[in-house]
Image (tube, rainbow, N blue to C red):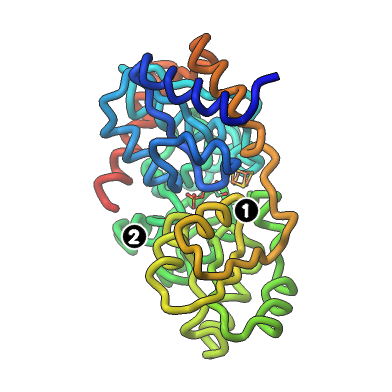
Amino acid sequence: MMLEADYKHRVLSLKKEKNAVILAHNYQLPEVQDVADVIGDSLALSRTAAQSDADTIVFCGVHFMAETAAIICPDKQVLIPDPDAGCSLAASINARELKSWIAEHHDAVVVSYVNTTAEVKALSDYCCTSSNAVNVVNSIPSNREILFLPDMFLGSYVAKMTKRKNMYIWPGECHVHADIKAQDINEMFKNFNNADFLVHPECGCTSTTLYHIATGELEKSAHILSTEGMMKHASASPAKQFVVATETGILYRMKKENPHKQFIPIKKDAICKYMKLINLEKIQNSLLNNVYQVKVPPKTAVKARAAIERMLAIS
Ligand code: 13P
Ligand code: SF4
C-alpha cells in the first residue's frame, strides 16, 4: 500500500514530467492543497488557468470549475481527477429552464454565477463569482432588467448592495451553504463577541448578517466575502479569533497561513461531499492516464467564453 508521502512524491514528479499545473479550490482536502501550484477561489483559479503556460491543467475542484478552465483555455488539456465531482448549485438550473426564463424577460441582461454549466454560461451575458458579483451588476445600466442566477442568497445580497429593484433572482441554492442559517450566526455571535465573522454570500445566514451589520451589532466585525476574500481578511485583520461561515475545507489553509490565530467553523458539518471526492490517488491516476478530460463543444465554448471574458474585464 502506498503512503500519503509516496503519493505526494509521485504526483509532484509526474506534474513536472507532463508540464502540468495543479489548481485547487480552497475547499479541497489538506493533502490535495499541499500538492497544488495555486489554491484559490473560483475567480483566482479562472485567472490562473487563463495565464498558465502549462500543457495540462489538473483541476482539483468541482466540474463547473474545470469546465470554466476548459472554456478559457481551449488549447490546453484540462483534467478533473473525479468526473463525479458535481455541484448542487450548478445543478439547480439547466439550459432549457434558462431559455424559458429568458423568453419571459426578452430585454433582460443575464448574469450567471460561475457555479453553472457551460450551456447555461453560453446563454448568459455575464458571468460573475462571489468576489465580483456586486461589481458586475453595478456595471450594467440601472434601467436594464437583470436575471440573476442560480443562487438566491448571493442574488439577494447583490440586490441589497447594489440597491437594484429590477433584478429577478433564480431560487437556487447550494445545499452546504443554505444549511448555515440565521440561528447559527446568532448563536456564534453570543458566544464569540470578540471574533471577526467571515460569511460566504451563498450562506442561508447572509441576510441576517447584513441586518446585524446595518443595526451596528456586527458593523465592524462581520464581512461577507468570497473564499479568497476570507483568506485575505484573515491575514490582514488584527483580530485573533475568526468565526468562518463556509465549507470547512478552507480552515486548513487559514490555520496554515495564520498559525497564531484561531479559526472556528460556524458549522463543523458544513462539508461539500463533491469537493472531497478528489484525493492524491485520483490525481496520480489523472496525470498518469490523462483522465478525465473536460471538453466543451466549440460552439458552446465560444459563447460561454464571451460571458466569462466580460466578467474578467470588469473585476
Ligand atoms: P468561491 O468562488 O468564493 O470560492 O466559491 C465557490 C463555491 O463553490 C462556493 O461554494
Ligand atoms: Fe457547489 Fe456548494 Fe459544493 Fe460549492 S460547496 S461546490 S456551491 S455544492
Name the residue located 67 percent from the left edge and 45 percent from the top edge: 272
Seen in the picture, residue 45 relative to 71 is either above or below; the reply is: below
Picture coordinates of residue 249, whole percent (x, y)? 60, 50
Name the image quarter holding residue 251.
Answer: bottom right
* Front residue (pair 255, 71): 255
For the N terminus, the image quarter is: top right
Q: Nearer the viewer, residue 299 or 86?
A: 86
Q: Is residue 104 shown above or below 78?
A: below
The numbered disc on residue 19 is none
Q: Is residue 180 left or right of residue 199?
A: right
- In the image, farthest residue toward the bottom: 216
Position of residue 228 relative to residue 206, above or below, is above
Label 1's element? Answer: loop
At horizontal 40% and vertical 69% (from top left) the residue drawn is 162
Name the quadrant containing residue 39: top left
Rendered location of residue 268, percent (x, y): 73, 59
Which of pointers 1 and 2 indicates the residue nearer the eye?
1
Q: Position of residue 62 (x, y in %)?
A: 56, 35
Ligand 1 within 8 Å, label 2 CB: no
Q: Residue at 38% across / 27% down in the picture?
A: 21
Please count the marks in the image: 2
Amino acid tagged 2: Asn
Kindly identify which residue carries mark 2.
135
Q: Amino acid at mark 1?
A: Glu
Work out whether residue 122 can be spotted.
Answer: no
Horizontally, residue 164 falls left or right of residue 188, namely left
Q: Element under label 2?
A: helix
Q: Earlier in the sequence, mark 1 or mark 2?
A: 2
Q: Is mark 1 within 8 Å of ligand 2?
A: yes
Q: Which residue is mark 1?
A: 247
Q: Residue at x 64, y 68 (%)?
A: 205
User: Does residue 272 show up?
Assistant: yes
